Image: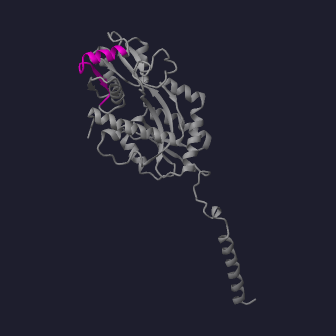
Amino acid sequence: MTLTTAWLEQTACNCLAIAGILLLPTSLMAQPTGTAQDFPAKPIRMVVGFTPGGTLPDTTARLIGPRIYEAWNQQVIVENRPGAGGVIAADIVAKANPDGYTLLSASSGHASIPAIHASLPYDTLKDFAGVTLTSRGAFLLVVAANSEIKSVKELIAQAKARPGKLNFGSAGTGSGTHFAVELFREIAKIEMVHVAYKGPAEAITDTIAGRVQFFMPPLGSAAGLVKDGKLLALAVGTSKRVPGYMDIPTLAESGVTGYEWDAWSGILAPAKTPRAVIDKLNREITRILSLTEVQQRLLASGVEAAPTTPAQFDKLIADQVALTSHLARTAGIKIN
């Protein structure tokens, strides 16, 4: 066989091979690398916008991380990037590669921040994809144990009898504890004076002392003081009574019809993260949240496991952005 003949035969074989490839089904030709089947192939970074310990996003991230490792043999690195009420951490995730390896463990404040900041380095609705809600916890409406106000109806009656004379504390302007009362104020149609503190501890101290008439902190921050008889809980802000605190009525049951406000945490990914990866993360985290030990740990922190579909979580955030924007406008709440 001459060199020319051999070359012609080899060229013919190559052409047939190429033709065979071209005849393959499109589904087989377009297989991307790094598919959900391969995910995760390296450690996952879960960014938290608050300091370690105590906050819902940090607590849930540290509960979920080790159990993902047990299931997938890939480490979950919890990275605390506190600052600006979670904005710094959210910005990191918004600008991360949308491959599922950088996630945000967010608080409900993530959906309130757009209402009080004139500009953010990201778009809350467009730059993130929901993975799942992870936990929900009640806010408590509390007064001093020796307060003359013993029910929500009495509180509303006093506020209407003395417009602008009662005051309430919050953990800061635009905080969840502030919006919780602004929603209460709007539905009940009452006027009160807002006293902003630097955090929940100071607000609780002044509520116990009677310097402010009431406060609405997360249940986990005040349950011990209610148990010790230093605070009186008039109602919870959730739509249903809270397990373990079934003697405390909801605000809706107390005459504030339609009231619902709670603290939550959830997992977000950058927008454009492949849907298959989002769904795989959702299934695994939902499984983890169904574990009895995880549910018990969350209950000990004053919250319940609350997994959702990605679509449900996206809607929750969109609804809360709309609600807090409305409340900020009507109450004149603005930071910058």
Q: Residue 124 location, x and y as percent?
A: 39, 45
Please state if 26 lies on the left or on the right of 229 as rendered: right
Please state if 200 lies on the left or on the right of 224 as rendered: left
Q: How is the image coloured?
A: one colour
Quadrant position of residue 79: top left
Quarter of the figure with the C terminus: top left
Q: Which residue is at 52% across, 42% downward?
A: 310
Q: Residue 198 location, x and y as percent?
A: 29, 28
Please state if 213 lies on the left or on the right of 283 as rendered: left
In the image, 76 versus 33, the foreground residue is: 33
In the image, 21 versus 163, the foreground residue is: 163
How many badges with numbers are in the image?
Answer: 0
Q: Which residue is at 72% across, 88% downward?
A: 5
Quadrant position of residue 226: top left
Examine the rendering and report whether any part of residue 2 can be seen: yes
Q: Residue 323 location, x and y as percent?
A: 37, 36
- Specify start and end residues of the magenta stretch as a single range: 153-172
Q: Which residue is at 53% across, 27% downward?
A: 297
- Where 69 sits versus 155, above or below? below
Query: Does residue 316 belong to the magenta stretch?
Result: no
- Where 231 sits versus 90, above or below? above
* Residue found at the far right of this picture: 1
Q: Residue 117 location, x and y as percent?
A: 30, 41
Please state if 85 lies on the left or on the right of 40 as rendered: left
Examine the rendering and report whether any part of residue 78 can be seen: no
Query: Does residue 160 belong to the magenta stretch?
Result: yes
Quarter of the figure with the N terminus: bottom right
Q: Which residue is at 46% across, 38% downward?
A: 316
